[in-house]
Image (cartoon, coloured by chain):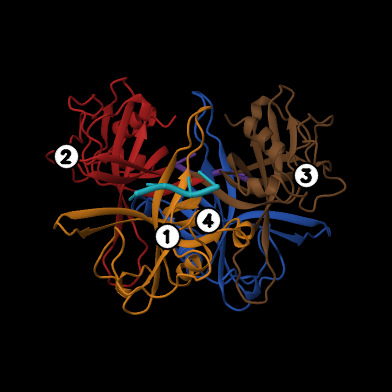
Chain colours: A red, B orange, C blue, D brown, E purple, F cyan
Amino acid sequence: MNRVILVGRLTRDPDLRYTPNGVAVANFNIAVNRPFKKEGEQQQADFINGVVWRKPAENLANYMKKGSQIGVDGRVQTRIYEGQDGKTVYVTEVVADSIQFLESKGNQGSDNHGSYGQSNSGSQPNVQPSQNNSFEGGDPIDISDDDLPF
Amino acid sequence: MNRVILVGRLTRDPDLRYTPNGVAVANFNIAVNRPFKKEGEQQQADFINGVVWRKPAENLANYMKKGSQIGVDGRVQTRIYEGQDGKTVYVTEVVADSIQFLESKGNQGSDNHGSYGQSNSGSQPNVQPSQNNSFEGGDPIDISDDDLPF
Amino acid sequence: MNRVILVGRLTRDPDLRYTPNGVAVANFNIAVNRPFKKEGEQQQADFINGVVWRKPAENLANYMKKGSQIGVDGRVQTRIYEGQDGKTVYVTEVVADSIQFLESKGNQGSDNHGSYGQSNSGSQPNVQPSQNNSFEGGDPIDISDDDLPF
Amino acid sequence: MNRVILVGRLTRDPDLRYTPNGVAVANFNIAVNRPFKKEGEQQQADFINGVVWRKPAENLANYMKKGSQIGVDGRVQTRIYEGQDGKTVYVTEVVADSIQFLESKGNQGSDNHGSYGQSNSGSQPNVQPSQNNSFEGGDPIDISDDDLPF
DNA sequence: TTTT
DNA sequence: TTTT
């Protein structure tokens, strides 16, 4: 039994890539606001890394961008990899089984929600396979179909 | 919206400590088995870090130990702290609102489920405040009541 | 362990009432769309009854109305009561611990989303205690503080 | 977004049937204990109806029985049917995507956990298609593959 | 008695 | 640094 449900906003555009075997995988990060405790306190949030595979990965990259509100239904995954310095890195992230697009209408017709510079939000969707296969802050090496959880 | 539900087994005895203000907090790690994919594959699991505060922290440390099966209802939390080497460490963990003890009967009357040596499972419960306040693999410094999520 | 998370739209305005002791309780029903199975199929939904107590009940009635999108975090509750015909009625509903308002911006500035007539959406919020204490389709009799789940 | 997680005990043996097309479907009811409120109060529980399809339905009927502790991961479903008296009946139940068997070892070697009489727990598993297709307290008529949620 |  |  391992189930996570989150509703939050993407802190950057989803990062879509493809495994050597052509399987789509998108990494994303969402800000999930914590409930307010006290008057006058500023909003706090958890910034949670997520991964999603195959068709939902492409849909996420095609339709959602920085600032988009999404619902995530998935599970908590832990994995380890060796960092550049040879040290073991421990990763805890959410693997999404499905992602719901909230606010889709309001979002579509509007501006780019504060994305800029390094971001590719706006007119052209970021669905092209990346020329470099490293994950931003993730496993830089061996994403193969053997990693697929299904 | 931020909700996590896990059922798994403690990979070690819960680590109960107290903040300077006397608030109980327990760190734990549970192995949550993944569903079997194929015949003949060996069991895989996610090893998820958790924290629980106050009374449920003391209950966990008093009644559960390495190998105990528990259900966790909580939320995903991310936080950062500065490591010994001055680098920022990113932590993703589960903050438990409540913990259910599964298998309590079988566990009570039985042996110590493989705990040994450095473990304090068995006759004496590990509820005494620790003389040193550092977290194993966590924030070594400032645990005060201000950190409390409620 | 009993946890439910829903995201959907109110099918009518929330129905806010007060127990004899002045405790606020709101009944609501939300339509939760099922994922599309096939092209060309029409949208299907589950229509789930919910209850929420105290401050979140008043907030729901004050800020949300028919058509509003909400997230619900709660538990499944079953209860029985005796119907008008003397037969036992079995009720399964969701008791919300917390409700998140989604789409709040788009909703505030806009029209009344199809509410009319018998509905009180619009200018005057429906927070006044009702003169009659019966539940629409629920337990018609004894709502006292003893029923409170906390 | 529609997710339910429950941990509880079967209040009777699962009821396994087959659709005319040979698809397995099991109905079950689990008691989910509520958290204790006060010292001296007696344990309260919610008694929740569930359905599960295909292979997990057969596994549930084969391995679990009245009293077995299970974890359920699924969604809330509402449906209506016409009762014997011609009145519309509203049903709210949990459709399980997956069911985890808790306590499996302790359960296997032990006695029948209080089942008796009308129950078929014990040596022979209740996997045979029933000669009559009515659901105990459910839709008495048309269970066809069209009802399958996947 | 059903929402977009 | 991983549980049954």
- Give the Cα distance between marks 3 and 2: 61 Å
Q: Are marks 1 and 4 on the same chain?
A: yes
Residue type at mark 2: give it: Gln
Chain to which the residue tagged by mark 2 belongs: A
Q: Give the secondary structure at mark 3.
A: loop
Viewer-nearest of discs 1 and 2: 1
The answer to the question of whether label 3 and label 4 lie on touching residues, with beta carbons closer than 8 A, is no
Q: Give the secondary structure at mark 1.
A: loop
Q: Quadrant of the C terminus of chain A?
A: top left
Q: Earlier in the sequence, mark 1 or mark 4?
A: 4
- Residue C112, placed above or below residue D122: below
Q: Give the secondary structure at mark 4.
A: loop
Residue A84 numbered tag = 2
Q: Nearer the viewer, residue C120 or B77?
A: B77
Residue type at mark 3: give it: Gly
Viewer can see residue A67: no
Residue D137 numbered tag = 3
Image location (x, y in percent) of residue A20: 28, 21
